[in-house]
Image (tube, helix red, strand yellow):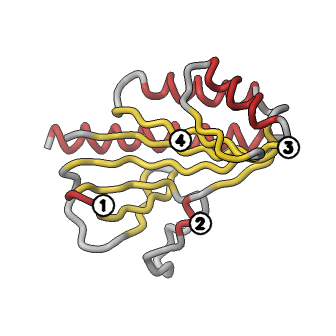
Amino acid sequence: MQRLFNILLDFYCTMGNASKLSKFLRDRGLTVRHTDFDFVRLRFTRHVDRNLLNVIEGIFKAVEEARGIWSSMCIEVWIEEDKGEKIGSPLLRKQGEVCTYIRPGARARLIRKIVWLDLCKPHVVVPIPESAMRKCVSAVDHNELVRIATTIKNFIEVQRELKEHKVSS
């Protein structure tokens, strides 16, 4: 089963800083797209493996180091699985400490996205808006960056455990 981890980071900068941020992130081996005078997008995709947590740690270290260059950042995180569990319609599921939105994707894929709001409650009706799976933070909020990194780490660990459980079943 192929599993791809995806992270999308959108940075908003004051005028003149988008080019600096693009260069800063590229110098650290990250692929970015500088699309506007105040906007930089980093899209990272990688197979889920043992080194993924170290790579994510490196990305967040670069994001933290660049806090003086960007003013706000929005993030989306998901895993795509080939031949995942079969579901007919989207659902919310608490997986470990992380609320996850699970929906069928194209070509028989399964998409698992982090939900940044605590919506994993019985009274919540799915589908939920995409905005619930997009978290935006200010560069000055260091504690929120730490919480985001911890949530992503927990999400990856839970997904790894789910995969190991399926393989051993």
Q: CA distance from mark 3 to mark 2?
A: 24 Å
Q: Earlier in the sequence, mark 3 or mark 2?
A: 3
How far across and down, in percent of the image, does residue 160 sit?
34, 37
Residue 130: x and y, percent?
53, 67
Give the mark toward the camera: 3 or 2.
Answer: 3
Query: Label 1, label 2: how many angstroms apart (C-alpha)?
Result: 18 Å
Separation of disc 3 and disc 4 at Cα? Answer: 27 Å
**Which-is-in-front pick, marks 3 and 1?**
3
Identified by mark 4, the residue type is: Ile
The tag earlier along the polypeptide, 3 or 4, is: 3
Q: Residues within 10 Å of mark 1 (few under 14, many from 20)?
A: some
Tell me, for residue 131, which label it has, or none. Answer: 2
Q: Which mark is residue 105?
A: 1
Circle 2 residues within 10 Å: few <14, some 14–19, many ≥20: few
Q: Secondary structure at mark 2?
A: helix
Element type where label 3 sits in the image: loop
- Dot 1 or dot 2, earlier in sequence: 1
Q: Quadrant of residue 34?
A: top right
Residue 140 position in % (x across, y down):
85, 41
Say which residue appears at 56% left-offset and 26% top-offset. Answer: 30
Residue type marked 3: Thr
User: Which of the two discs, 1 and 4, sits closer to the camera?
Assistant: 1
- Helix, strand, or loop for circle 1? loop
| Residue at numbered disc 4 | 152
Q: How far from the left and from the top, in percent, is residue 40?
A: 67, 41
Pointer 3 residue: 14
User: Label 1, label 4: how many angstroms apart (C-alpha)?
Assistant: 21 Å
